[in-house]
Amino acid sequence: MPAGLLAAALRRSSATPLLTSYDDATDERVELSAATLANWVAKTANLLQDECDVGPGSTVALALPVHWQTAAVLLGAWSCGAAVLDTALEDEGRAAGADVVLAAQDRLPALEEAHDDASATELWGLSLHPLGLGMTGYSGAARDFAVEVRTHGDVFFPYREPDPAGPGLLVGEASLSLGSLTSAAAELAGRLGLTEGDRILVDERTAAEAGPVAWLLAPLAAGASLVLCRNAAPDRLASRAAAERVTATLGIRVEGVRELGRRG
């Protein structure tokens, strides 16, 4: 199960960097240890369970970019036993049938237009602020994730145990069960050649196209850590790879660093 992958990372090393996130458009850098990410995951899972009644059989749609907060939301939803519908690539209409939608603030207007007043879907907005602050300049109906998630507990206990056979990730017309997410991640990690201790520089667009099994779960399954890059500035990549001690890249070429998924 996906939550087990994060638990394994905590056992290996709770304090070393597990996920580092850059946005070159805003010069942001955020670094999370396994312990810090686990804290965000627990708070998110408690919010989803207590505020939205999310559990096995629920569908949680994400209209979020590849981001450290997205990692916390994904793992939080899976901790509840919910199926995740990933709409990272700008398809707001697909989220209409979900029980809960968590969206970046800039995608809320399109989502509000796609959901009529009678919709039972609960809508939450994320500012994606580097310090996890709430939304500003927003007056719609969505609830503010960052403001409310902080009030929830640091330890999560599901009211109903997740079902490994239940849906975990919805991709087009296909789905992966919660139980198969972990095995799919381990299999992909093997095919990519990921090993424990790898530090992977990940391009946002490539990661969004590949999906969360590739950019989040496969590295966790391998015991690797992540450096996520949004709006990556090509002239910064070599120095960033050196500073972050990157050992492999996904969707980015850096001279002298192996590129995952590339042959020859």
Image (cartoon, rainbow, N blue to C red):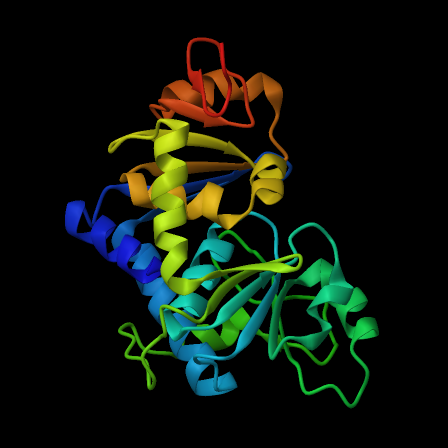
Q: Quadrant of residue 31?
A: top left
Q: Quadrant of residue 39?
A: bottom left
Is 177 in front, or is 244? 177
Q: What's the residue at 60%, 35% (across, down)?
A: 206
Number of numbered labels in the structure image: 0
In the displayed structure, does residue 5 sit left or right of residue 180? left
Residue 19 visible (yes or no):
no
Q: What's the residue at 47%, 42% (across, down)?
A: 215
Q: In this picture, is 165 found above or below 173?
A: below
Q: Position of residue 234 (x, y in %)?
A: 61, 20
Residue 77 visible (yes or no):
yes
The quadrant in which the N terminus is found is bottom left
Is 15 in front, or is 95? 95
Q: What's the residue at 49%, 80% (across, down)?
A: 57
Q: In this picture, is 134 found above or below 243?
A: below
In the displayed structure, does residue 109 sit left or right of residue 239? right
In the displayed structure, does residue 93 sit left or right of residue 174? right
Q: Position of residue 126 (x, y in %)?
A: 59, 64
Q: Position of residue 236 (x, y in %)?
A: 54, 21
Q: What's the residue at 38%, 18% (across, down)?
A: 242
